[in-house]
Image: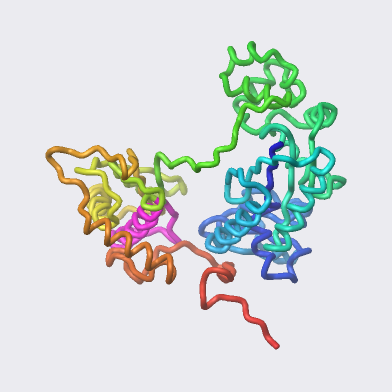
Amino acid sequence: MFCLVDCNSFYASCEQVFRPDLRDKAVIVLSNNDCFIVARSAQAKAMGIGDLQSLFTIKDWLQQQDITIFSSNYPLYGDLSARVMDTLQLFSSHIEIYSIDEMFLYLENIKAGSLKHYGRQIKETVYQHTALPVGVGIAPTKTLAKLASRAAKTITQTRGVCVLDNALKWDWMKKRTPVNKIWGISTRFAARLADLGIYSALELANADSKYIRRHFNVCMERIIAELNGHACLSLEEIPQLKKQIYCSRSFARKTTQLPVILNALSVYIARACEKLRAQKSLAGVLQVLLYAANDQHHYHRQQMVISLACPSDDTRLLSKAAKTLLKQLFRPGVFYIKAGVGLLDLSIKKHQQLDLFHPAQSAKSEQLMTVMDKINQRHGRNTIYIAAEGVQQKWVMRQAYRSPAYTSHWDELPQVQC
């Protein structure tokens, strides 16, 4: 059986962990620069607050309703996510971390009659270790486990744990699931299925899989098989290496100053290179993105790409190349609202292809980057950094409602008062 554990309203729940006074109250979390609502607690959803609503349009109403607002606090969310995943590994040796708030577990040697009890044990242990509520869905395929997880979070009678272990339960759930809510089916595919008279998961499961494959693809045929209890998707226990790494952010306010954008770009390069080195890869191509804002508040994207002489993960080298590209893109007097970098054409460091005419990255460079990463991992990000990142970061995004980094910053640890 596959088990999917999914955290409820993850970002909002993280904000409630160290604020017990907010656990039964409406809480919302905002996107970068405090623009849109990206997470809502159950109480906030019940009040009709929509996903991706603009804060500007309902800020006064939120204050009148005494709804607590938070800016995104990614260090906190990342750390609590890691704690959830560590806890879940106690229940299975075969796991797949699907996203920041979801993990698949493969359950072996659990008797059919004990599945619900085991799911409840998972739910209670995660809450005991992290104070985060989760939904647990158990079924013989990953697609059905997704449906079970959805039921665990939306059907009160399940009390957070749903087991779909026979065909009668599958059909009951599939009949009540719109086709656009099935894992792996996009809005575009859902519209095409509607043209064929298929609106629910049950109707899709009963469709001719060969006919559907001819009109869509083999992935849709696998979804039909999974909906009928035949497992086609296995766990991806080894995380897939990223083929591209991007880092981009909007600025707190528009800027026409080249030094400010250069500063921001250097920081983005540093973050992207950290991810690159973490997966032991090298980048062969660098992309720089720059977004200009016009009078109608629309963005105009400019970009340039350069191939490196040899694949590299050296922050200094990539920062220098990005600086050269940015200077070619920049136009004086233009207001810029966002910048970003992309590391492309990634290759595994262990199996890199050398070039007869260009030497590979030096051993000293690799040693320096390793030392930088170890120091920052041990003492906190930006303990050591390249000079181009600077200390006066006027471009950093707005976070007017940010909570403390309770678990990852010494100065912001919770304090017990006697």
Q: Which residue, as the protein is rendered here, is positioned at the far left?
A: 357
Q: Which residue, as the protein is rendered here, is positioned at the far right?
A: 157
Residue at 56% from the left image edge and 62% from the top image edge:
73
Depth check, front residue: 267 or 257: 267
Name the quarter where the C terminus is drawn.
Answer: bottom right
Residue at 45% from the left image edge and 45% from the top image edge:
298
Residue at 58% from the left image edge and 71% from the top image edge:
406
> Please, is residue 245 above or below residue 231 in the view?
below
Residues in magenta? 248-275
Taking the image as shown, residue 373 lies to the left or right of residue 191, namely: left
Would you say residue 56 is visible in this rendering?
no
> Please, is residue 408 above or below residue 148 in the view?
below
Instruction: Determine which quarter of the picture holds residue 416.
Output: bottom right
Q: Which secondary structure dominates the residues rendered in magenta? A: helix
> Please, is residue 391 above or below residue 348 in the view?
below
Depth check, front residue: 236 or 391: 236
Residue at 32% from the left image edge and 68% from the top image edge:
390
